[in-house]
Amino acid sequence: MNFLRPDRALFDAAIVDLDGTMVDTLGDFAASLNRMLDDLSLGHVAPAAIETMVGKGSEHLIHSALVHVLSPALSKAEADAKARALFDRAWERYQHHYLAINGRHSAVYPGVIEGLQALRAQGLRLACLTNKPTSFAKPLLADKGLDGFFELVFGGDAFERKKPDPLPLLKTCEAMGTEPARTLMIGDSSNDARAARAAGCPVILVTYGYNHGEPVRGVNADGFIDSLAELVPATGR
């Protein structure tokens, strides 16, 4: 498998995405969105459809889910307008339900613990950077026993813009005091890769994540891994 080995000679730190990279949260999204839709007296959205909506922040996820369930009865423009009109109520209900079930329907991907341990063993500093709201991300990391690996956790509301904008990566590097060129981005989607490229960070992507329903190997990245366990040095396996 072709990817950049996270060697201390090359990198000082790594920035790791959350949803689709460390934790499979599709079940949490489905439960929260469908409870939100129940509150709005709307139909449900299937997990397969939700998977293509994940990765651009909760606002995009909620709007996309609303358009999806409204579209069969309305034109695209009408569904979009109706979704915008319902958004504030939907956002309030989604937050309520997500905070209540956060982590209950999700699981850490195999190899994640071993990969994070390997990064730390190499002496790399670690930050978690996700488009998920910080109030969702921190409890999830704690629930899954991952919070101890990261000195910094930034959600999608931490900065003025979200990935794929490079700003969150640049701000995370600044907070850690590391140069982008020596800070490895590890994610699962084109959002992570585009942000990394624009910020000047090397990037590797996992092959099992969401990537908006598109084949991840078509993304411009420095390498791909099937498991974070592949970050373990050969001598440490």
Image (cartoon, grey):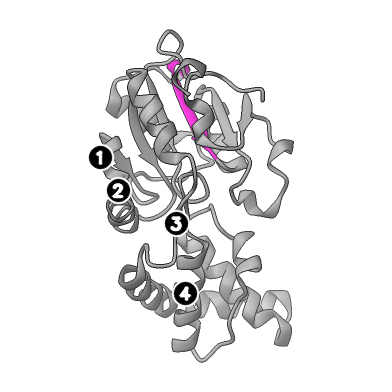
Compare marks 2 and 4 and give the one earlier in the sequence: 4
Give the extent of the magenta segment. 181-187
- Residue plotted at (48% across, 19% down): 233
Q: Amino acid at mark 4?
A: Ala
Query: Mark 1 and mark 2 in contact (Cβ < 8 Å)?
Result: yes
Classify mark 1: residues with Cα within 10 Å, few (<14), some (14-19) or many (20+).
few
Query: Residue pushed farthest bottom?
Result: 41
- Residue plotted at (51% across, 71% down): 30
Q: Quadrant of the N terminus?
A: top right
Residue 97 rendering spot, x and y as whole percentages: 36, 75
Q: Amino acid at mark 2?
A: Gly
Q: Is residue 83 above or below residue 220?
A: below
| Distance from Cα at disc 2 to Cα at disc 4 | 22 Å
Compare marks 3 and 4 and give the one earlier in the sequence: 4
Q: Which secondary structure, mark 1?
A: helix
Task: List the residue tagged with mark 1.
Answer: 148
Q: Is residue 55 above or below residue 216?
A: below
Q: Amino acid at mark 1?
A: Gly
Compare marks 3 and 1 and give the one earlier in the sequence: 3
Q: Nearer the viewer, residue 223 or 68?
A: 223
